[in-house]
Image: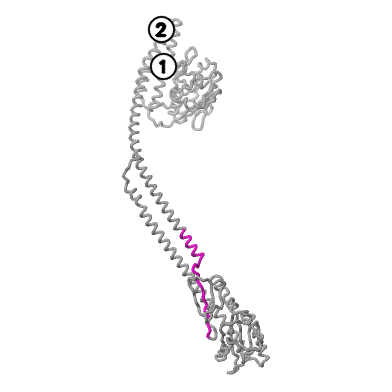
Amino acid sequence: MIGQSSHLPDELRRGLGGPIRWRLLLALVVVSGVALLNRIDALLQRDYGREALAQAVQADALIEGSVWQRAQLLTTLAALTASAHGSRDEIERFDVLAGEIRREMPDIATVYLLDGRGAVRQARGEDAVPGGTLTHRAFPLRAPAMRQAAEQHGVAATAPLTLADGRPGTLMYVPIMAGERLTGYVAGAFAYERLFTRALAGQLRGRFAWRVLDERGDVIATSAAYPTRIARDIARPLALPGGHGWTLHVAVESMQPVMARTLNWTTGAIVLLLVVFLALREEFRARRFAAYSRDLELLSRDLLDANMRLEERSQQISDANRAKSRFLANVSHELRTPLNAIVGYNALALDGMYGDLPQPLRASHQRVQAAADHLLSLVNDVLDLSKIEVGRMDLEIESVDLDAVLDGVATVVEPAAEAKGLRVDVVAARDLPKIETDPRHLRQILLNLVANAIKFTERGSVTVVAKRDGDKVAISVEDTGVGIADADLERIFEEFEQVRPNGRGDSMQRGTGLGLAIARKMARLLGGDVSVISQIGRGSCFTVVLPTVQQQSPTSTVHTFETRDAARNPQPERHVEPNGEPSSAARSVESHAEPDARG
């Protein structure tokens, strides 16, 4: 049973023992994923550092190139001034060239033309000597650069100083030589802010933080926001004319590159969480599947036991059905033999073979005749139902003309209809085909339905309509009786079911309750069916649908009892009594439906 314990197969045991291996594998995947993310993060930082180094090298070259470019311009200005003819020509040349230099290089605040003592002879720009009387040699930070330039006959720069407008900067001096004699200087004042802004335009700005330190380590220029926490500081020396130098520092922040690293860790974390979730979900499914498998194993055992019991019961039922069939066949044989004798001798008495019968005695013989016919029809109905249920009903399939069958049925039931004042109409379509079926069973089905309709119709008519329905034929029996309640439409096709409320009446009038059951079962045996639609107070319509071509029946027919019974006890001919009442054949096909259900 389900509640009992059972040993699990090896597959299930391995499945239930799998979570440990699953979790070890999952832990390995998570650790490997974290290691991979860390490796990718390190590569992103390394690439960012390499990019910062490349930017620093390029910025170093740009700054040095800018400074030496300006030194070369001052050298060219000094050479052109030295080659002038006279003082006036010298000043004119200076004015023209100095103006061009400042226009091309706005980071040069002032360009000076000095004499040999350092006094300003001419100046173009912003930084004039305060008071106008002091020479450049009077400033302690400028004098050493002037001496160095005169001694080396080359460019020399001052240490960082404050220009006349208060901005930090530097001055470069180039001597003007007439042979070996010093005649003056050309000097240029550079503001650091303008110099670095122009030199680093498009380089480092906005992406990497930077600053420039002088020889003393003081910051002479820096980017807008230099970080305090950096992962790497890239330092590049800057060589200036005259032996001075600066240092360029490019900072690599600790969290850079922020976007790439954030995307890496976010995406990686989502993927790892998804892997963990899927693995845990699969583990849960595996456990649930193992539990289901265990329950299914127990259920399969129970089902196997139940199937064995059902097979035993089925065998018992099959044996009982065979015994019932044998019993019904024997009983029908034993009953029909004396009944046929009773019917025969009674008919002889009614025909005057034993002399004329007084009227009271004749009436008694007629009731005996009716009762015997009713009992014989009951035996026949029970036997037919038994044969259908056990698959022993004989089918003799042949091509059947429906017009002839319908006319024959109408002829049989017409006297009973006339006795009640009813009209029987038969309507057959012109394209009605011949069908392959058993004519005897078809006639019995139609007699059942038409006799039922006449029995439960008090006034009006009974109409039989036959028409083609695709590859089938539909035969409808419509009446103008009282109809059947919706709740009883299916129940009337069950065996021994009657729906008359005043069910205690003459049994010969009420019937056996087998007619419609046999009609439907026979129709289905022929490959068709019987259906009904009805409305209380307006009548009913029973429809028989049969195929035009008979398919091979899946149930085999047995001829043993039917052949023996037919040989020994032939069916009595179905006829209409002279008094207009339907004979036993017509009465034997009556429905179990009671008058109150039909009218």
Q: Secondary structure at mark 1?
A: helix
Residue 262: x %, y % from top left: 49, 63
Residue 50: x %, y % from top left: 48, 72
Which residue in the protein does label 1 denote?
Answer: 375
Residue 211: x %, y % from top left: 54, 75
> Three-letter amino acid code at disc 1?
Leu
> Three-letter amino acid code at disc 2?
Met
Q: Nearer the viewer, mark 1 or mark 2?
A: 1
Q: Which residues are magenta?
A: 243-269
Residue 444: x %, y % from top left: 45, 22
The answer to which of marks 1 and 2 sits earlier in the sequence is 2
* Occupied quadrant, residue 38: bottom left
Residue visible at 54% across and 70% down in the picture: 207
Total marks placed? 2
Query: Which residue occupies the foreground of this view, 125 or 67?
Result: 125
Task: Using the numbered discs, state the Cα–Cα distance from disc 1 to disc 2 in whole angstroms.
Answer: 24 Å
Q: Answer whether residue 255 is magenta in the image.
A: yes
Residue 358 lies left or right of residue 167; in this view the side is left
Q: Which mark identifies residue 353?
A: 2
Q: Secondary structure at mark 2?
A: loop
203 up-or-down from 78: above or below? above
